[in-house]
Image (cartoon, grey):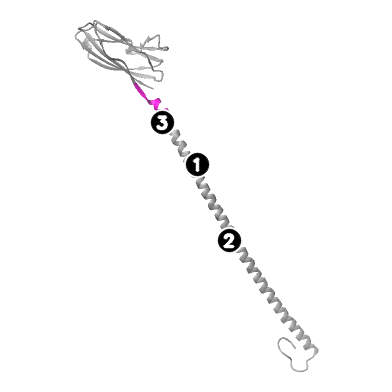
Amino acid sequence: MTDFGVRQAAFSSTEAKQDDVITALALLHVDVATTILALIDGVETALAVLHTDVGTTVVGWINQLEAYLITSNSVLTATYDLLGDEILTALNLLHTDLGPLTAQTTLTFVADVTFDDDPTTYTAAGEDVSAYRKFLLLVNVAVVNNPATIRVHVQFSDDNVTYYNYMNGPFGSLVYEDSAAPTLESIQGECLADYMRVYVAATGTDGTDKFILTVKAILVR
């Protein structure tokens, strides 16, 4: 007898062997099918586990990348903020440094002084001009009646004690007569010493005949 039914009465030994083979093949078929199904289940389980592991790993990577990007963004933002502050500070310092390089100032050496019988001369206080390299002298001369002359001397010093007349160009002879007044003049010169002042001497002045003088200097770096 086989799994496929019962043979009719008497059968030969050959047929018996055939039945044994058929039975063995049937059993083998069942075993192979069972094994294959088990393998398929194992593969499916392994793939499911692998899928879960891969998914977990990828999600972990993504989370790490997000955290890194967030941290990097914070660091970069802080760096940009710091650099921005440093650049702004540097620009402010540069502006501060450039300011004095381009700045100018005005010094008044003689302020509306009347030269009559007293005074006939005037010496302005020395001023520290070491930070400047050029000056523009502004001379304003007014006349009352008929004085003779008034001479303006620009002077420089290296120690604010001994002063020397500046003799460059027109500065060697800044003389004004009554017939030339009123006078408004500006004369450019170089400022190469540490101290500067103005000395003025008038002639022919008295209580009636007068010069009224203002002298300023615009100094630039």
State which tag comes first along the sequence, 1 or 2: 2
What numbered label is drawn on residue 79?
Answer: 1
Residue 65 position, x and y percent, is: 55, 52
Locate residue 194: give its quadrant: top left
- The answer to whether 209 appears left or right of 11 in the picture is left
State which tag comes first along the sequence, 1 or 3: 1
Give the residue pinned by disc 2.
55
Q: Which amino acid type corresponds to the residue marked 2 in the rendered image?
A: Gly
Between marks 3 and 2, how big is the CA–CA gap? Answer: 58 Å
Q: Nearer the viewer, mark 1 or mark 3?
A: 1
State which tag comes first along the sequence, 3 or 2: 2
| Secondary structure of residue under mark 3 | helix
Span highlighted in magenta in the image: 92-105
Residue 106 position, x and y percent, is: 33, 20
Between marks 1 and 2, how big is the CA–CA gap? Answer: 35 Å
| Secondary structure of residue under mark 1 | helix
The number of callouts visible is 3
Q: Which amino acid type corresponds to the residue marked 3 in the rendered image?
A: His
Residue 172 vertical placement versus 36 (above, below): above
Q: Residues within 10 Å of mark 3 (few under 14, many from 20)?
A: few
Q: Quadrant of the N terminus?
A: bottom right
Residue 211 vertical placement versus 9 (above, below): above
Q: Is residue 44 magenta?
A: no
Give the residue pinned by disc 3.
95
